[in-house]
Each structure stands twice: as structure tokens, then as C-alpha cells.
Image (cartoon, grey):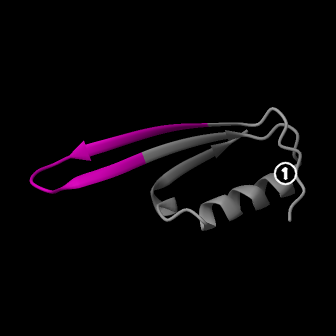
Amino acid sequence: EIGADLAESRVAAEVQLEHSGALRYSLRTRVVVELPATDTQTRETLLREALRAFPLADQIDLSES
């Protein structure tokens, strides 16, 4: 357990699905995470763990503030 204060945290995501021919699709995702009540080390740990558990993590452009 990380024990982070997630008060006033926000996550916003943009997802773009592109079609380029019969049965050819690509997925682009941009995620913005705001964790104002956490320190840098806790924020990095939270984001790393969240991405580790997400099957499409290699297709996410992650920004943090």
C-alpha cells in the first residue's frame, strides 16, 4: 500500500482511433494526471504501478503535473 493523499487529483484522457484500411486500426492515447497532494516520489510510484497494471500502457503518452 502506498498511502497517498489523492485529494483533488484529476485524470483526463484523449483517445484517438485511426482506421487505415480493412481491419487496420491504431490507437493513440494521451493521459494527463494531476496529483497535487503527493510528493514527486509517491507520484512516480503511483503512475508506474498504474501503467504496470494496464495492458495498453505502451500506447499511452503520460503527462503529469
Residue at 26 percent across and 44 percent down: it is 18
Q: Is residue 17 left or right of residue 31?
A: left
Quadrant containing the C terminus is top right
Dot 1 falls on a residue whose secondary structure is helix
Residue visible at 85% across and 57% down in the picture? 41
Which residue appears at 89% of the width and 45% of the height? 5
Q: How many marks?
A: 1
What percent of the width, then of the height, locates residue 35?
78, 41
Amino acid type at circle 1 is Thr
Q: Please tell me in which quadrant of the rendered image residue 45 appears.
A: bottom right
User: Is residue 47 located in the magenta-colored stretch of the structure?
Assistant: no
In the visual, does 43 lie left or right of 3? left
The residue identified by callout 1 is: 40
- 10 Å crowding of disc 1: few (<14), some (14-19), many (20+): few
For residue 16, above or below residue 39: above
Q: Residue furthest left?
A: 22
Instruction: Please state, as top left, top right, bottom left or bottom right, where the N terminus lies in the image.
Output: bottom right
Does the magenta run of residues contain 18? yes
Residue at 81 percent across and 32 percent down: it is 8
Instruction: Please give left or right for residue 12 compared with residue 3 in the image.
Output: left
Segment colored magenta: 12-28
Instruction: Give the main secondary structure, helix, strand or loop, of the magenta stretch.
Output: strand
Q: Position of residue 12 (x, y in %)?
A: 59, 35
Image location of residue 22, percent across then percent down: 9, 54
Q: Position of residue 49 (x, y in %)?
A: 70, 64
